[in-house]
Amino acid sequence: GQNIDQPTEMTATEGAIVQINCTYQTSGFNGLFWYQQHAGEAPTFLSYNVLDGLEEKGRFSSFLSRSKGYSYLLLKELQMKDSASYLCAVRDYDYKLSFGAGTTVTVRA
Amino acid sequence: SAVISQKPSRDICQRGTSLTIQCQVDSQVTMMFWYRQQPGQSLTLIATANQGSEATYESGFVIDKFPISRPNLTFSTLTVSNMSPEDSSIYLCSAVAGELPDTDTQYFGPGTRLTVL
């Protein structure tokens, strides 16, 4: 099975940077996903890491260290619309996703 | 990429009844899954929808309660049977597109918000 931990809540100011950490212990690893979920909506794909290192996509970056069972999502130049829940999910060799509980990010003006 | 649609988007049902949720993908996909998100919680996998054969269920989920069909590579249904208020959740269809094993795509449908009275 998978055990995935991420902080429950984070608050930051508009224009700032926030880093959401995710640690995992798995019985099989076939990639790590980050999703964004606004209240009442479905998760939307943000990033995917399967190899160690940093993946950058505009204001969002994601990092993975497989040896440490660790990932982070970095949100830069925060905007009010970034207020949402951010879900860390680990995929196994059967392509099944196990999700962390999610981190609620609140962006304040 | 793949675009996933679900019907209905939401429903309010009486306990003891059943509801079938449809998931349609706009292109052929390799794998399809059904997830549940209970109020205030994260997503939990219900089952893998296998094309042309019985679904593979996760621990805590059984076929009699959540029968699943997948007749082809673009369509699947999930039925929530003999509903109780504890079944009130968002049900999400998910699909893996691209060539296995090297695929970085895993999409979700918009979800079906179910309330059982």
Image: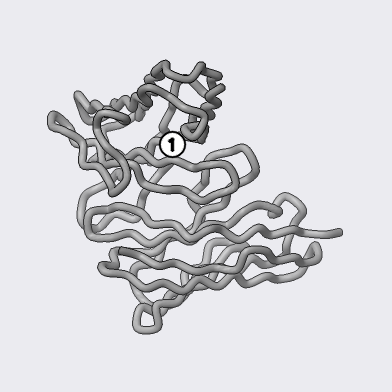
Q: Residues within 10 Å of mark 1 (few under 14, many from 20)?
A: many
In this rendered view, identify the residue nearer to me: B68 or A74.
Answer: B68
Q: Quarter-wise, where is residue B25 in the image?
A: top left
Secondary structure under badge 1? strand
Would residue B110 be visible to someone looking at this image? no
Relative to residue B96, is residue A74 drawn left or right? right
> Is A19 on the left-hand or right-hand side of A45?
right
Name the residue rendered at 30%, 52% in the picture.
Answer: A96
Chain letter of mark 1 equals: B
The quadrant holding residue A8 is bottom right
Q: Is residue A65 above or below residue A18?
A: below
Q: How is the image coloured?
A: one colour
Question: x, y (%) of residue A90?
Answer: 38, 62
At 39% from the left and 36% from the top, the residue drawn is B93
Quadrant housing residue B108: top left
Locate the N terminus of chain B and report the quarter of the image it occupies: top left
Give x and y (percent) for residue B75.
29, 26
The quadrant of the image that shows the C terminus of chain B is top right
From this view, report whether residue A73 is shown above or below residue B93.
Answer: below
Q: Residue furthest bottom?
A: A67
For the point 57% across and 42% down, the residue is: B39
Q: Please report the residue visible at 74 percent of the width from the left and 58 percent of the height from the top.
A: A106
- In the displayed structure, would residue A90 be above or below residue B49? below
Q: Which residue is mark 1?
A: B92
Res. B104 in view: yes
The three-letter code of the residue at mark 1 reads Leu
Residue furthest to the right: A109
Relative image position of residue A80 (x, y in whole percent)? 77, 53
